[in-house]
Amino acid sequence: MNEHHEKLTDARREIDLLDQDLIRLLKQRIDAIERVGACKNDEDIHVFDPIREAAVVQAWSTASEESGLSPIFTKRILKEILDHSRRRQESRVVSTATRTVRVGYQGTRASYSELAAEKMFSARDETCRAIGYETFEYVFDALDRGDIEYALVPAENSLVGGVHAVSDLLVSREVAVLDEEIWSIRHCLAMLPGTSIGSLREVRSHPVALGQCRKALRELRLQVVEDFDTAGAAETLKASGDASIGVICSREAADLHGLHVYSEDVTDNLPNETRFLLIGSQAEEIVRGVAVKTTITFAVDDRCGALADCLGVFANHAINLTRLESRPNPGSPWECLFLADIEASRQDQSVQEALREIRPFVNFVRVLGTYPSRRPIGAPTRPAAKVHARPIDRNATPRPATHVPAPNTRCVSVGGVPIGGEQFTLILGPCAVESEQQIDDAAALVKAHGAHLMRGGAFKPRSSPHSFQGLGFAGLEMLAKVGGKYGMPVVTEVLRSEDVARIAERADMLQVGARNMQNFALLKQLGQIRRPVLLKRGMSATLKELLQAAEYILDGGNQRVILCERGIRTFETATRNTLDISAVPVLKNETDLPVIVDPSHAAGVRHLVVPLALAAAAAGADGLIIEAHPNPEEALCDENQALTPVELRQLLDGLGPILTAQGRSL
Ligand code: PEP
Ligand code: MN
């Protein structure tokens, strides 16, 4: 017994000494890595050297076999070492000053997200203070408020696929993807110390973790109960003292809460890897010399070939797509939103060209970020510089985005009504929403006169503060209600950036009025939303300025912009404004965005509206936006220019032959 005890103590002493050696050797290895990093930095050499890495893996395997160790086991250790080394070299290249940053994650201490965050930051020149939140939404909210500098969230898992709640936040919030981490998941089955497996009745954990251990749990005949977090379930179990409950969590979480680990790994299929993303509020400088990935999001209409058109653009530029996930677009049923990863940098010329070329095919497109690609050690790899395979034509003339001579106009769908296609689009309605009765009567009137869409201002930009300012959100509600009742999508004006999101929930298209054409904060906000925007020309804006204003929206990601000529200020006083008919062919030549005309605000008086409208159609406009009122004499604004049934009839009669001659229809 005594001799036995002595042997054990000796062996343990030896282990402790060897462990110290291992740590010392690891430290020496990291110091050497930093010297390699410094050399690469000085000579501008890629950090990632696949040939050297493959040689190290091979040498390690051979040495393992020779000493009788399993190369599978030693390669797992090497993977962690190489991964850490690559990042040490990168952080030398980026060279951010050491600072403490707050990193939010979903869950509690020792959840996989927190472990992944700690690993990621162990190689960044930043010290991480990880903060757990109950839901992914709270994590993103905290980032939005500036409570945390970063968020670390799971994006996809090798067994269960995309984490939908995270994808939905990525496509809807203004965030940047900065880095990724591939984490090998090992789910333990843990229980209170001193309890036996026979006493267990149920197992609690995060639904994703439970889903990954289904087979094992079925064999053990345990009932599954969902919890918000793996480590959280461990914490609750410890507090409850209930011997009939087990949890699925990380080894670290079981240790942290003093639980007994019944089984180290109860996952159904291995390997089980989760890809985590580091999210920030702003893009970071792209690290040179490492293989990179870029995450983008885009939305397309429910149209045959829409997705194929987009993917074809990437294929033509030899850009490899490594992930494509589709998500529903809340508020726009059946308009698909996609989240895609490509193996290239957003700075590559091929990517920039591709992003420009897909604009006509998408409703929305945004780059979420370019970041170092973390591949499994030993997986086939290609250095970043070789990614763009198609030779770049140096003689090709660069094409600025809005100055592409566009033979075809892109077709924009507004609540299912196309603008810019074969059909000529009529938008009719009162200047302002005045009451439930008035807007219902107006809807009946314009519907009877062929309106495809209905207009109505709820927020009115009035020259005088004493004039009627609109009914605000109450008016918007009334407009949305009659739009639904009469089957017409609705368009209404937005005056302030802070109202954009709320108006976008109820209106099918948001109008930027003439007075706001250069409200750049408002335009930027409209670049972020998933609703078409009707951009009116400012009353003293040149067409170039109108296109530059449109570019603010397009650059933000929103590709559904419709331009509107509505008359400009000239020396002429016979009309309220001078309708610049030449704007139509000029804009059509300069851009592929649909162009419509508002003759009402140009004319200012009823009897001039129809002739100007017909002129606009003849000049090639894609549609008209015209004011009409059930009782013009009682209208609260722009009463002199509101059409009555008489002029609406004249309008339809006049448009018929003009559109027929153009091969278009109403
Ligand atoms: C309007 O459409 O009601 C309006 C105010 O138009 P504009 O911005 O062109 O004056
Ligand atoms: Mn008006």
Image: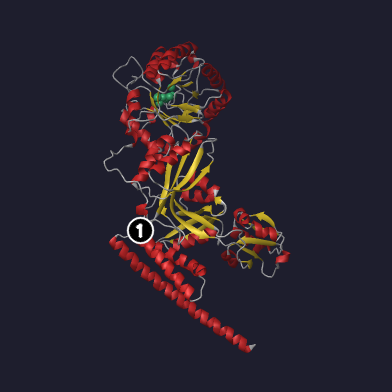
Residue 30 at what x, y percent from top left? 40, 69
Q: Residue furthest bottom?
A: 3
| Mark 1 Cβ and ligand 1 under 8 Å apart | no
Quadrant the N terminus occupies: bottom right
Q: Quadrant of ligand 1?
A: top left
Residue 190 at what x, y percent from top left? 64, 64
Residue 268 at what x, y percent from top left? 61, 59
Q: Which element is circle 1 on?
A: helix
Taking 337 as reference, is 151 above or below it?
Answer: below
Residue 37 at what x, y percent from top left? 34, 64
- Quadrant assignment, res 443: top right
> Is residue 488 something one can see in this rendering?
yes
Q: Number of numbered discs present?
A: 1
x 50%, y 30%: residue: 508
Q: Residues within 10 Å of mark 1 (few under 14, many from 20)?
A: some
> Is residue 172 something one can see in this rendering?
no
- Quadrant assignment, res 261: bottom right
Amino acid identity at mark 1: Val
Residue located beneath label 1 in the image: 94
